[in-house]
Amino acid sequence: MSNVKTASQNPQSQVASNGTKKKRGPWREVWRRMKKNKAAMVGLLIILILILSAIFADVIAPYGYDEQSLVDRLQTPNSKHLLGTDNFGRDIFSRIIYGSRISLQVGFIAVGIAAILGGTLGAIAGYYGGKLDNVIMRCIDILLAIPGILLAIAIVATLGPGLRNVMIAVGIGSIPSYARIVRASVLSLRDQEFIEAARAVGANDFRIITKHIIPNSMAPIIVQATLGVANAILSAAGLSFLGLGIQPPTPEWGAMLSNARHYLRDYPHIATFPGLAIMITIFGLNLLGDGLRDALDPRLKS
Amino acid sequence: MFKNKKLLVLLSMVLVFALFAVGCSQPADDTATPGTDDTNEPADEVTVKEELIVGQGADAVTLDPHSTNDQPSSRVSKQIYETLVAQNENMEIEPSLAESWESIDDTTVEFKLKQGVKFHNGEELKASDVKFTILRALDSSHIGHIVGQIDGEKIEVIDDYTIRLSTKEPFAPLLAHLAHTAMAIMNEKAVTEGGEDYGQNPVGTGPFKFNNWVIGDSIELVKFDEYHGEPAKLKKVTFRNIAENTTRTIELETGGIDIAYDIPPTDVSRVEENSDLVLQRAPSFSTSYIGFNAQKKPYDDVRVRQAINYAIDMASIIEAVYQGVGAPAKGPLGPNVFAGHQGLEEYGFNVEKAKELMADAGYADGFDTTIWTNENQQRMDIAEIVQNQLKAININTEVKVMEWGAYLEGTAAGEHDMFILGWVTVTGDPDYGLYALFHSSQFGTGGNRTFWSNDRVDELLDAARVETDPSKREEYYLEAQEIIRDEAPWVFTWIGENLAGVQKNVKGFTQHPAGHHSLHGVYFE
Amino acid sequence: MHRYIFRRLLLLIPVMMGVTFIIFTMMYFTPGDPARIMLGETAPEADVIRLREELGLDDPFLIQFGRYVKNAVIHQDIGRSYTSNRPVVGEITTRFPATLKLAALGVLVSVAIGIPTGIISATKQYSIFDNVAMVLALIGVSMPNFWQGLMTMLVFSVYLGWFPSSGFSTPMHWVLPAVTIGTASCAIVTRMTRSSMLEVIRQDYIRTARAKGQVESKIINQHALKNALIPVITVVGLQFGYLLGGAILTETIFAIPGVGRLMVEAVLRRDLPIVMGGVLFIAVTFSIVNLCVDILYAFVDPRIKSQYK
């Protein structure tokens, strides 16, 4: 939200991001365009439902996420257990509801780590250029040269398993893309007039970067971040599938899926629902990401 | 569609590159295709299949028995090599490369070798090969401990077919150790010539000889025509590496493999109900246990350890996790291990008793603890159920799934509270199944990861190790097991079972309790 | 251009040095003793100590790292696997073709289906074809690929029996893994092609062409496609690299003896020489693929070519 303020306090930025003549904040303009995009609204709705279920998990879920009942194990969906039970007799619906907390947490924190570290590196590289740029980008190249999942596996092996370390591992793995995006947009902004103007009135580099450059390169970062959350959730699920990562009985969807694969053929519902949960979430994030991109880049709108 | 030339060129480049990448890996695949050469056989002959494909969960590490001690490797090595003496499926010692043997004194045994035994490279087996093998084994950091009791300086070659082995002190389980797959007799010349790459060109005396290895994928063995015993009925045996349990079962069901080792409990009913398949069940030497760190509070109190034994409903765990495969364990040894005490009283599921004991120990309000496991599915499942059941006696447990390396290191250093681990008494001898786990000299890396010890148990285990009279040994071991049961350094969990899925037309396959099954007598119907 | 390629290849050296250092450091500080893992929980400590000495594991970090770099640079020897004692190079080169083939098949699937679909979608924006294709593409990126792999295996191999469930030996064996690994990339390529095409179509020179009254198909093929595919090339190149590294899950599910699985096993066993060798191998391949992409880039876009001096 603070971006909205900084952006609107800064008249030049409007010129940079779009050419509206009305005195309307550019973000409100984006929202106006988003509202017209049905797909994006569906995506937003999915994400909102997800966030709500994460917040009110205790209220919504009929059972606890680790409430076992070995007598009721491996039940198919029925009136008592909406989505059936798993191999410990735990209610799958409840676990999926609680799982939204974990997935959102993994998604947002991993992306947060990546965006902050990657963004900072990218901004510094792009703004100062020269040797510093070269050094930073070579480091990014090094990170990029190591396959993401392998890097994540190695990091989890080094740090030990657990939710926190999975988030760090996935986050570090996606630093390069943010660094590159931010660097690219900083490069395109660096020599623009309003930046030069700011420099001329004596603003220091830190101020220029944080007040002028970052807000104006937000668009691609936001799009990348939305899609990045999706990727982070998938990566964490992949790590869980390989048996590394999140600790039981944490109802992480990927871990649920990984566990369910042993029962896949006889009780496909155990694997189906967490799989669907992942799919729908990522589907929503992708719709939203696309919508944001379209809305932030008016040239594409017909 | 594409009238643009450059674009066309570009796209074709991508395609060519892709095809090139696909194509250049072609040759490797031909070797990986099992059973392609049977197309050359005459069609009119009614052929009985003679090529067996076995699926197991990992590729062999090396076929040099002295450079590894893992199950997938020994399952392959078992077909290629032979040992001086062998243990059959009932764990009786039988002659193998040694025709006969006799004790010269308390520490020395004389072996008479079978004559006319050929190695796969054409060399004849001589006593010097045996000496060479044992010296090399003693020098191996991988399996040295298995023959560690043999005195390398006192190996005496009497003639080409007679050899004497001495142990440093009387060592009752010597023959069982010599029957271990790691003690496969190798050919001195082949090993010396093979150098560092011997592990990929193994030479043994067994019914099958090594033919080809597509690393990570499959190992191919062919019948050895000059085998000294009854020749193998199969012409070719291929071991395929299929790591995913589910995939291995599917591959069996779809006919891609003839035998699948280690059918997971979840697939048992599928294999049983499939009319084309037979599920072979046989007792194994593996056990699972939940250990306590007995030097750490509150587990230094025997009442807490007993209380947890009472608080866990092992029967329902076995049912839920192992789907009825195997059996609940009464004590540290299974029934098929020599002197495995089956008269031990089970703790049983008794929450009231558990609560009483907890109160006695001053933990009526329970405590917070952790339970460690590695990422073995069954162990993780057990951990989750235990976590849940211990809530009843107010113990708040956190499950910590660790990666194998870190797990071994952490438990050896005593950083854990509770942990789940297994043990395989490979030799079928209680010394192997108790000494490392319960003797105070074996704390930490030695194998005693509970850090529990008892002077009387130490005494009994030491005495039984050097006692040569079997009935006295049995007595010692039975007493030790009773103490262990009462002192409860473990929650006795589960006794394993070997499960192999076999196509109906495969005959003559039996499983060895130690897991390395011989394919010598297998044939197709 | 040659100088540019040469410079890029030269740049590989520091990158590889960096990769070596990072992975070596991480593996070194990872808890878990390779000797203990190899010997198992049953081996006595004395044997573990002996093996540690044989492998030189007790030396300080810098000495171990220095030894590794020295052997690699001077003797072109990146060692033998701790576990199997086979030379690392052989271990990787026997497994690499499978991974390469898997990734290539994935790219093939994604290009062969993704590009045409993307083009049609863009030219017929908001048509039924476009909508269906875009929803499918979104589902494609949204599915966890190991889940998809298991499901396709379940349906096409267990229930229908059309394809073998594991292995990688004959073209029949390739189908399911290729589809599994290619789906997400295919979806990405489709979306990229579409959006890049849309962007190009709106540009002035296309408008000019339209204004001049050129036939629509000619506009698309002659003018739009060429420019629209430039970003697609990058994406395909990136996907290829990504698939090389991401083949791990597919390899695991379908029991394909590739580098990915080797690497996971090696990390778990702390088999440092294999991990190092494998990462370097994949990193070099990946970088070379990237270089090829950049060269192709220049090939289709003369503006970029003029920058490479």
Image (cartoon, coloured by chain):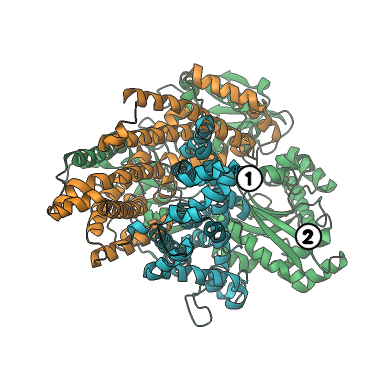
Foreground residue among A70 and B457: A70
Please state if C3 lies on the left or on the right of B406 as rendered: left
Foreground residue among C302 and C109: C302
Picture residue at 40% right of the left edge, 28% below the top: C8
In the rendering, at what x and y percent does residue B412 appear?
A: 71, 43
As measured in the structure, the alpha-carbon distance from the residue carrying label 1 to the one carrying label 2 is 31 Å
The residue beneath circle 1 is A159
Image position of A83 with respect to C216: above or below: below
The amino acid pointed to by label 2 is Arg
In the rendering, at what x and y percent does residue C147 appear?
A: 42, 59
The amino acid pointed to by label 1 is Leu
Find out whether the residues at labels 1 and 2 contact each other: C-beta distance under 8 Å: no
Mark carried by residue B305? 2
Q: Chain of mark 2?
A: B
Q: Chain of mark 1?
A: A
Picture residue at 44% right of the left edge, 63% below the top: A30
Please state if C178 lies on the left or on the right of B160 as rendered: left
Q: Could you say which chain is coloured orange in the image?
A: C
Q: Could you say which chain is coloured green in the image?
A: B
SS type, badge 2: helix
Q: Could you say which chain is coloured cyan in the image?
A: A
Q: Residue furthest bottom?
A: A79
In the rendering, at what x and y percent does residue B15 appear?
A: 24, 41
* Residue B262 visible in the picture: no
In the rendering, at what x and y percent does residue B337 appear?
A: 64, 50
